Amino acid sequence: MRNKWFWKCVDILTVDSCRCCGNELLEGEELVCLECQMHFPLVDSAQEQTPLWQLMVGKVPFRHATTLAYYQPHDAFARLIQDAKFRGQPYTNSFLTRLLLQQLEGSGWPYDIDLIMPVPMHWLRFLKRGYNQVSPIVHTLSEVWHVPYEKRCLVRKRYVKSQLKANGEERLRNEAGTFRIRHPERLQGKHILLVDDVSTTGSTLLACADALLQVEGVSISFLTLGLTLHI
Ligand SMILES: [Zn+2]
């Protein structure tokens, strides 16, 4: 695989053509043409029982849960997520964040959340990849919604290898007990929004929530860019 600087250059040098179909962008279009955007499998966030809500209900107490779109490997939306995740492309990341904000507008979000935090990355993976692709998304949401961004209180204490080939039960087993809390006093009584890029079985969100809910008075909501319902 080429290094991250190569993909950053690709991101910067190809802003005039659609990232999904390659056609030249028309005036007013950014990164992805409107024709391709029309085919994104977006989720209606105004409904209470969103697909992510349905995935998480009964597994852990939470307040709200939604996702931007279904993640279907190999489709245009999934490719954008992969560009942001594995190639660290900043334009792609900001495009996805804008789309997310647009999709959530008028749907009740961000409700009454007190803190917003990304699913943390193990320091070893951070060193390898050089960035946490969810951080800039959370940073922007925090600014737009005027909700404090918290990134130090939830820590990933175990390095879990890529879970792409793991099934649901294996993922749950791998992620259980992976996270720990620092400075619990900063979290007491807060409604916390946990943000991740893609959720497949919900196991990572579940493991984070298990750790956070140990703190007195904490309640949780979930937000992801993509959701794979079947693997
Ligand atoms: Zn296109």
Image: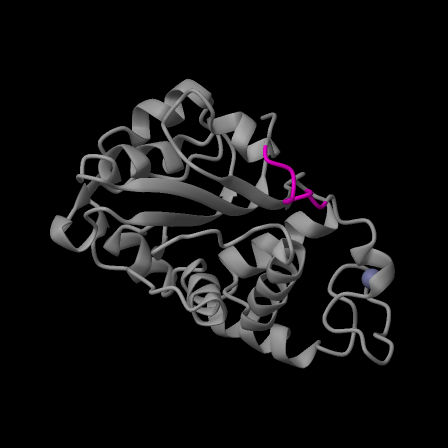
Q: In which quarter of the image is residue 209?
A: top left
Q: How many labels does the image show?
A: 0
Residue 178 in view (yes/no): no
Picture quadrant of residue 104: bottom right
Q: In which quarter of the image is ligand 1?
A: bottom right
State whether residue 184 is above or below residue 89: above
Residue 154 lies in the magenta-colored region: no
Viewer-proximal residue among 201 and 115:
115
- Up the image or down, 19 lies above or below 56; here it is below
Residue at 50%, 65% in the rendered image: 88
Percent of width and height locating residue 38: 83, 53
Image quadrant where one finds the C terminus = top right
Q: Can residue 224 be seen in the rendering of this structure?
A: yes
Residue at image x 45%, y 42%? 222
Q: Indicate the position of residue 66 as horizontal and vertical percent values.
A: 55, 42
| Left or right of residue 38: residue 211 | left
The answer to whether 19 appears left or right of 88 in the picture is right
Nearest the camera: 118 or 17? Answer: 118
Q: Does the magenta stretch include residue 46?
A: yes
Instruction: Give how far across and how far down residue 174 sits, in percent.
Output: 31, 28
Q: Position of residue 19 (x, y in %)?
A: 73, 64
Give the residue displayed 87% in from the left and 77% down from the top. Answer: 26
Main secondary-structure element of the magenta-colored stretch: loop
Q: Which colour scheme is used?
A: one colour
- Report the magenta residues as a range: 42-48
Q: Give me the residue at 50% from left, 56% from top.
A: 86
Front in this rendered view, residue 60 or 83: 60
Q: In this view, does 17 lie above or below 42?
A: below
In this picture, residue 160 sits left or right of residue 40: left
